[in-house]
Image (cartoon, helix red, strand yellow):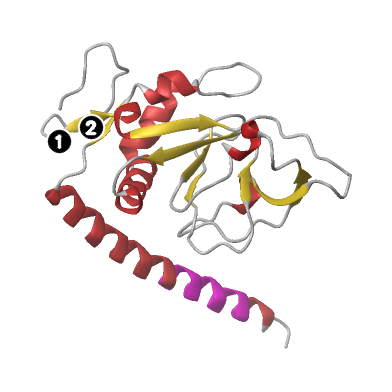
């Protein structure tokens, strides 16, 4: 598994085995969803950029839409467990993972691309998100972004890019990375809480 010459340049270290994204995942660009005001439609949660967390899985989206769930084109875009969702129009590179055990059906907003790994979906999703948030992933997004007025990334070009291939070594790295990131984020939230409490004491 190596980086084909025809693919966009990346900053992935040469010694890291790679695989083409579209070879291990299906990429789905969400359509512009038209809401149905009639009671006959089905209620969905609409995952949009405002729902993306700095860390962890997406929380339950606040916005709901009512659409015809029976149509095949709608059913295809219903989000599944451990799908990766990423913004590729306007604000580029916001990314997250869909959690399990959702009580309602979720669909993505139209500026979002769904990356659905075919095997080891959770492990692949965590590794992919870690890669996209790294300096290597950020550099890739810079290389692929175009558009003078509204930044956009081509789904086709993105699908053809190399990503680090899943391996026992990478899995070990991702596990350690995720554990450390979770601890640091917990500390970050605690420090932010302490700062808010300090500010509230002013002139008390």
Query: Could you tell me if residue 110 is visible in this image?
Result: no
SS at circle 1: loop
**Residue 39: which disc?**
none
Q: Is residue 147 above or below residue 26?
A: above
Mark 1, Cα crowd under 10 Å, few <14 / some 14-19 / many 20+, is: few
In the rendered image, the residue lying farthest to the bottom is 204
Which residue sits at x=16%, y=24%? Answer: 2
Q: Let me know if residue 191 is in the magenta part.
A: yes
Q: Determine which of the numbered discs, if any, sits on residue 12 in the image.
A: 2
Residue 41 shown left or right of residue 198 in the figure: right
Note whether residue 182 is visible: yes
- Hey, which quadrant is residue 16 in on the image? top left
The kind of secondary structure element at disc 2 is loop
Position of 114 with respect to 11 (left or right) is right
Residue 53 in picture, x, y percent from top left: 54, 56
* Image position of 5 with respect to 144: above or below: above
Q: So how many labels did they put on this image?
A: 2
Task: Name the residue beneath numbered marker 1.
Answer: 16
Q: Residue at x 43, y 29 (%)?
A: 141
Near-viewer residue (150 or 198): 150
Q: In the picture, residue 109 is in which quadrant?
A: top right
Q: Position of residue 11 (x, y in %)?
A: 26, 29
Tell me which segment is drawn in magenta.
187-198
Quadrant (top left, top right, bottom left, bottom right) of the N terminus: top left
């Amino acid at each position: 598994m190596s980086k084909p010459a025809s693919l966009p340049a990346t900053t992935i270290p040469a010694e890291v085995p790679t695989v083409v994204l579209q070879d291990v995942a299906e990429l789905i660009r969400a359509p512009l969803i038209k809401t149905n005001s009639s009671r006959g439609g089905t209620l969905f949660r609409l995952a949009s950029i405002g729902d993306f967390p700095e860390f962890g899985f997406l929380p339950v989206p606040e916005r709901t839409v009512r659409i015809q769930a029976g149509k095949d084109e709608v059913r295809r875009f219903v989000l599944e467990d451990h799908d990766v969702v990423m913004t590729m129009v306007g604000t580029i590179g916001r990314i997250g993972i869909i959690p399990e055990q959702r009580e309602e059906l979720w669909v993505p907003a139209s500026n979002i691309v769904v990356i659905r790994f075919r095997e080891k979906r959770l492990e692949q999703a965590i590794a992919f998100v870690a890669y996209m948030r790294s300096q290597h992933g950020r550099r890739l997004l810079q290389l692929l972004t175009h558009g003078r007025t509204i930044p956009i990334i081509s789904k086709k070009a993105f699908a053809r890019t190399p990503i680090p291939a899943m391996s026992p070594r990478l899995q070990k790295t991702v596990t350690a990375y995720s554990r450390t990131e979770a601890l640091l984020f917990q500390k970050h939230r605690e420090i932010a809480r302490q700062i808010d409490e300090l500010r509230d004491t002013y002139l008390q």
